[in-house]
Amino acid sequence: MAASQTFSLLAFTFSLLAFASTVSSHNITQILADSPDYSSFNSYLSQTKLADEINSRTTITVLVLNNGAMSALAGKHPLSVIKSALSLLVLLDYYDPQKLHKISKGTTLSTTLYQTTGNAPGNLGFVNITDLKGGKVGFGSAASGSKLDSSYTKSVKQIPYNISILEIDAPIIAPGVLTAPAPSASLSNITGLLEKAGCKTFANLLVSSGVLKTYESAVEKGLTVFAPSDEAFKAEGVPDLTKLTQAEVVSLLEYHALAEYKPKGSLKTNKNNISTLATNGAGKFDLTTSTSGDEVILHTGVAPSRLADTVLDATPVVIFTVDNVLLPAELFGKSKSPSPAPAPEPVTAPTPSPADAPSPTAASPPAPPTDESPESAPSDSPTGSANSKSANAAVGVSTPSLFTALVTIAAIAVSVSLCS
Ligand SMILES: *[C@@H]1O[C@H](CO)[C@@H](O)[C@H](O)[C@H]1NC(C)=O
Ligand SMILES: *[C@@H]1O[C@H](CO)[C@@H](O)[C@H](O)[C@H]1NC(C)=O
Ligand SMILES: *[C@@H]1O[C@H](CO)[C@@H](O)[C@H](O)[C@H]1NC(C)=O
Ligand SMILES: *[C@@H]1O[C@H](CO)[C@@H](O)[C@H](O)[C@H]1NC(C)=O
Ligand SMILES: *[C@@H]1O[C@H](CO)[C@@H](O)[C@H](O)[C@H]1NC(C)=O
């Protein structure tokens, strides 16, 4: 028992440390803007938001296609298909021209961004790189029976060892990528998708309130949905929805979607306030984001929520599950509430420390500062949300508080292992 508690404390500590190293400094859009030859490729990186994903990562290689090579894809397929094809050109490893020619045994497989999408069974998300005779380097899908149909042509730019950009002469096509069904098929039944993802309560609310129609009308131009799981609606601190007016329920549900396509990479690199479908005036009903390692945390001003799974990412629509119901400050904030907002559980949670604490980790500090000033990035109080998520979310506040938190955790870890 003691060992596992100590372990979870240590894991938590490491997740705090991971927070420190998430921001990268390259901007693929800007780098490629210098070469008109890549204008088509660059434009598709922006339209599919792959640019954000690339900018949020380091130790990667982008295999670019000039406008001639891009014409095999451009305009010939839905955006979601082009996104898959281009994801195969983003290698999750750093290959500069020297390394390409020094591959051990002359051949290797590299993971690509496509592998991270969950749409790539087997080795479909891997690329075979082979040093062919005469200085030629060939690229192809790692799926068996694939040919090395693409060749390295030249180096475009390197920022060691963050990003390397190399030109190849043809797209790398994995079996099935170009013939994937159009996303409209799966989108015709959003509620079905949500139910399968464990978000039946949310799906039912969308239907009964009529907000589903608002979502559906955004599908063509871009839609991002944050669907709380069924557990999220049962969690402590979630207000009784039957006590809300119809207009408030509508705002709450509209608050769970954006009228734009923002896949995970875009949320990771986001620095701005994000407007939701409920936003109707400056700064109202918007969201902010922070990251913790590879995780994205959404902030409402009331409580944070972790982005959990991607249910569907079919440009321009993306549907995520989230761990907590997103409570907008406009409805549930402590002071600025226009209506009698349900108080966050005065009996079970007398202090702002996490109430539903399963272990000493969450019951004790680090309680994030109850700083309600709007400027300090994640100002959420962790009321009613699950332990480590809220604590993680509070990490952005300042270095001293990070330090205090680490020291506190170290102290708890020691006392836990000594006492048991
Ligand atoms: C590489 O990325 C790191 C962040 O991961 C950044 O601090 C560093 O400045 C980058 N290096 C260059 C040369 O841009
Ligand atoms: C990257 O560069 C493009 C073009 O210069 C610019 O529009 C965009 O805002 C930049 N992105 C970031 C995150 O700085
Ligand atoms: C890459 O493809 C070539 C040609 O099909 C094959 O001979 C080689 O074994 C493959 N490399 C790896 C690492 O699978
Ligand atoms: C949507 O999906 C759900 C669950 O898969 C199913 O029960 C329902 O009949 C579907 N609705 C339509 C209109 O296809
Ligand atoms: C961003 O949101 C915060 C609250 O979450 C608010 O205080 C701030 O004014 C907003 N900034 C802008 C530019 O709207």
Image: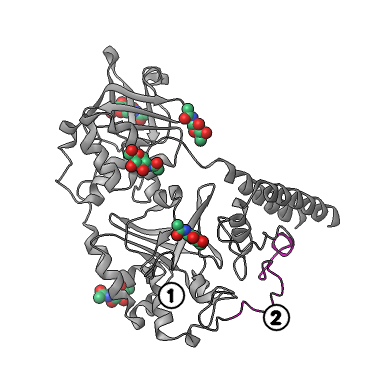
Please, is residue 372 above or below residue 124 in the view? Answer: below
Q: Which residues are magenta?
A: 342-364
Q: Residue at x 39, y 33 (%)?
A: 110
Toward the right, the furthest residue is: 419
Q: Nearer the viewer, residue 80 or 137?
A: 80
Mark 2 vs ligand 5: CB below 8 Å: no
Residue 182: percent from left, percent from top: 21, 57
Q: Nearer the viewer, residue 59 or 179?
A: 59
Q: Quadrant of the N terminus?
A: bottom right
> Label for residue 252?
1
Q: Whole-Å distance between the Cαs marked 2 and 1?
A: 25 Å
Residue 368: percent from left, percent from top: 67, 59
The amino acid pointed to by label 2 is: Val
Residue 201: percent from left, percent from top: 43, 77
Secondary element under disc 1, as helix, strand or loop, is helix
Residue 59: percent from left, percent from top: 45, 32
Say whether residue 203 is left or right of residue 345: left
Mark 1 vs ligand 5: CB below 8 Å: no
Please, is residue 384 above or below residue 295 in the view? Answer: below
| CB within 8 Å, label 2 to label 1 | no
Secondary element under disc 2, as helix, strand or loop, is loop
Magenta part, dominant SS: loop
Say whether residue 144 is left or right of residue 231: left
Is residue 367 visible to the viewer in this orientation of the structure?
A: yes
> Label for residue 347?
2
Task: Reply yes or no: does residue 351 show up in magenta.
Answer: yes
The amino acid pointed to by label 1 is: Leu
Task: Reply yes or no: does residue 257 show up in magenta.
Answer: no
Please, is residue 10 above or below residue 348 in the view? Answer: above
Toward the top, the furthest residue is: 134
Q: Residues within 10 Å of mark 2 (few under 14, many from 20)?
A: few
